[in-house]
Image: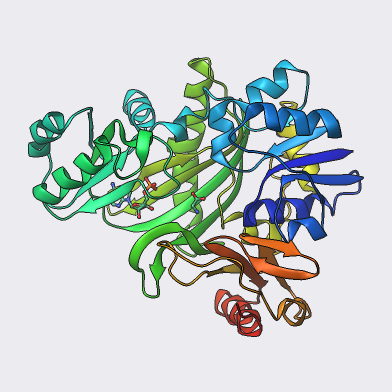
Amino acid sequence: MKVLVIGSGGREHALVWKLRQSNRVERVYCAPGNGGICAAAECVASDLHSLDSMLEAAHRIQPDLTVVGPEGPLSLGVVDEFRRRGLRIFGPTASAARLESSKSFAKEFMYRHRIPTARYAICDSADDVRKNLDQFTGHIVVKADGLAAGKGVVIARNREEAVAAATDMLTGKMVGEAGARVVLEEFLEGDELSFLVLSDGERVTPLVAAQDHKRVGDGDTGPNTGGMGAYCPAPLATPELLDTIDREVLVSTVHAMKRGRRPFRGVLYAGIMVTPQGPRVLEYNCRFGDPETQPLLMRLRTDLLDLLDAAVDERLDEFEGKLEWDPRPAVCVVMASGGYPGAYEKGLVVRGLAEAARLPDVKVFHAGTRLEGDRVLTDGGRVLGVTALGETLADAQRRAYEAVACISF
Ligand code: AMP
Ligand code: GLY
């Protein structure tokens, strides 16, 4: 089979790496890929903001299956367009991906279907915001409604900060169009968990519970980023807790989406806050997490193509209780450009990759890199996802940092 992966980050490098291990895969293509992916797959130029550009890539390649990495193409309707043209594709339609592309849609959906989440108010103007603030005490979470690549959430310490953040969003100053509507939310305290499942529209196959590090600094400090690292399995995720999240959140969501005529096929990722009152949904993602996918796929032993095929063909029941995992935990450490998530330099030479690659049970996934001749150059904020398996989480962490120490840019 020919498989096309859409995207250009660490998650897509991990997908390409894992798909290549399938016996049934003859060739893997990636649109547009990055410096590391181009060594493992055939990269084709593509503009992920343009449906025509992605369709054109598929037209040239004629893939037997396309796998979509990021949320942008999903919300544009890449799955709808490919299916209309008879191209098999893994991922939710634009209307199912609303769970991620509109926070107000997601909140109203959860409220209607009694899926546990923080109290909220949806606001279209600064006046709305002021009127609704009385419902909240203490910290208030202000979120842009639309897709904002992890930059649309502000945790305000008081009313003034909440009004200021909401105003920056509503006027387009902070995240453009994505902030034309905002959601205010009660601040929840607890530990965060990323729970990823596969769905074929009807059934739910749990993949993994992971934790990611959102803030840029050590000790969970500094601004939110797209994710500085991740590990799985998460010790916090007891079987009882996972069972509760599976039933109360993921199965309920998939069934309600089906009843609402937006069947969800693809990866559903619930960002959960584990509070003393139980798990609460912070957000839905309609795709594999980045960087959660890197440690997840290091541990997955089941053939990924078989799994994705089953989700597309609505026969995930074949995999019930049958997923195989490496029992060892995995840790991914993201190496980012100096200055990220603010301004940073690009085009620096990355050294030490060959040395890191020689370490056992370590895989360096590329995120923001590009090739120039035989040199690898930095090309984004998150540059590499250095991922390692270990006998324990601490051992996996030690191995990942051993590989990090080999690399410089
Ligand atoms: P989101 O994009 O909705 O996942 O939000 C990004 C991050 O903001 C989350 O990973 C949390 O760390 C934090 N966050 C979001 N919503 C809340 C909330 N209601 N209470 C506390 N923290 C939150
Ligand atoms: N790791 C966060 C995300 O994928 O959205």
289 vs 84: above or below: below
Residue 50 on image: x %, y %: 62, 31
Residue 145 on image: x %, y %: 34, 34
Residue 123, quarter of the rendered image: top left
Q: Residue at x 48, y 52 (%)?
A: 194
Which of 295/250 is in front? 295
261 vs 121: above or below: above
262 vs 299: above or below: above
364 vs 30: above or below: below
Residue 178, quarter of the rendered image: top left
Q: Residue at x 21, y 46 (%)?
A: 165
Does the rendering let one see residue 239? yes
Q: Residue at x 67, y 72 (%)?
A: 389
Q: Quadrant of the N terminus?
A: top right
In the displayed structure image, the side of residue 202 where residue 61 appears, left or right: right
Does the rendering let one see residue 318? no
Q: Residue at x 71, y 26 (%)?
A: 314
Q: Quadrant of the C terminus?
A: bottom right
Residue 239 on image: x %, y %: 51, 54
Which of 199/251 is in front? 199
Which of 102/362 is in front? 102
Q: How many marks?
A: 0
Instruction: Report the colour scheme.
Output: rainbow
In the displayed structure image, the side of residue 363 where residue 397 appears, left or right: left
Residue 100 on image: x %, y %: 46, 35
In the displayed structure image, the side of residue 226 where residue 321 appears, left or right: right
